Amino acid sequence: MNIYRKIYNEIKKYDKIIITSHIRADGDCVGSAIALREIIKESFSGKTVKASYENVHYLKFLGKSDTILDSDFEDSLIISVDNAELSRSNDKRVVEKAKNIIKIDHHPNLNPFGYINFVEEEKCACSEMIFDFFLNIPKRKISMLGLEAIYTGIMTDSGNLKYPSVTGDTFKKIGLLYDLGVDGLKIRNILDEVSIEELRFKGYVLENMKTTKNGVLYILINNSIREKYNIEYDDASNMVNALQGVKDHPIWVLINEYKTDEIRCRIRSLNIPINEIAAKFGGGGHKNASGVVLKDYESVDRLLDALDNLLERK
Ligand SMILES: [Mn+2]
């Protein structure tokens, strides 16, 4: 039996289904959760299905998370989407409910916590896997909201179809979403919109970024800067992309002080793997996109030195 049929049969067995995602929500985990809810709602009759995720302002157009009551968990099937580690679930109650969990994810499967684990690391987005599920089940139906959620997940997790994980098949799926009526331009315009505060903050980042001897670009952000520019913590972190694509600067880092002893660094690179350095500093991630959390600025200096050495050897 193929995996789609297996999951389909499990959903059929339960009256109540709860879909959960990961903490610090992004477009893919929210998109996957909503899309799967819409598929189950439309294609299966008589199910109570709820999607749970953290509400983030730039995804407001997809609607707010459903409210999950304690009683909803009784005799329910939990489907976790886009989440590699059970401890990173957006709803901590699922940790006790682990026996009824199906895992659908595209991160390295170091913690196969589901009784069914559907994991495809090569997929650029979990939303792409949800779309595959939809395309492979009988009597399938989905709302326009579900299709828009899939589009949002794929676009946000692939850097607008620019990351190496994007394949011809990803483009075909985007084409199919258009054929099914998704207005991609409308959604991209919403996703690309910035506030005037974000634009001013971007100005700060570009004005104040520094470079190491061999060309690691970096910017330091702390609470007083975020307050001055009236910018949320996560929006500040996302500004790492502002340092991308600079000639002779293939590694760039955004250092965002969360607390004085919790300094979160986002490291990005072009063609130079940085995840081993990230791992040495207790972090991790993908080859060209990793993160570490450091305790003090001496460690930040050591991190920048280590990254700088990568460029020296080239
Ligand atoms: Mn994802």
Image (cartoon, grey):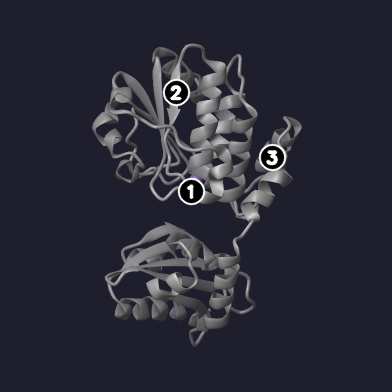
Tell me whether the residue at label 2 lies in contact with that at label 3, contact meaning CB atoms closer than 8 angstroms.
no
| Amino acid type, label 1 | Val
Locate residue 278, reporting x and y percent: 38, 66
Locate residue 25, reporting x and y percent: 45, 47
Q: Is residue 2 visible?
A: yes
| Amino acid type, label 2 | Val
- Residue occupying the point 65% across, 49% down: 190
Q: Residues within 10 Å of mark 3 (few under 14, many from 20)?
A: many
Residue 275, quarter of picture: bottom left
Q: Distance from label 3 to label 1 (Cα)? A: 24 Å
| SS under mark 3 | helix
- Residue occupying the point 36% across, 42% down: 90
The correct choice, above or below, for 248 with respect to 58 in the image is: below
Q: Nearer the viewer, residue 239 or 303?
A: 239
Nearer to us: label 1 or label 2: 1
Mark 1 C-beta to ligand 1 under 8 Å: no
Residue position for label 2: 49
Residue position for label 1: 56
| SS under mark 2 | strand
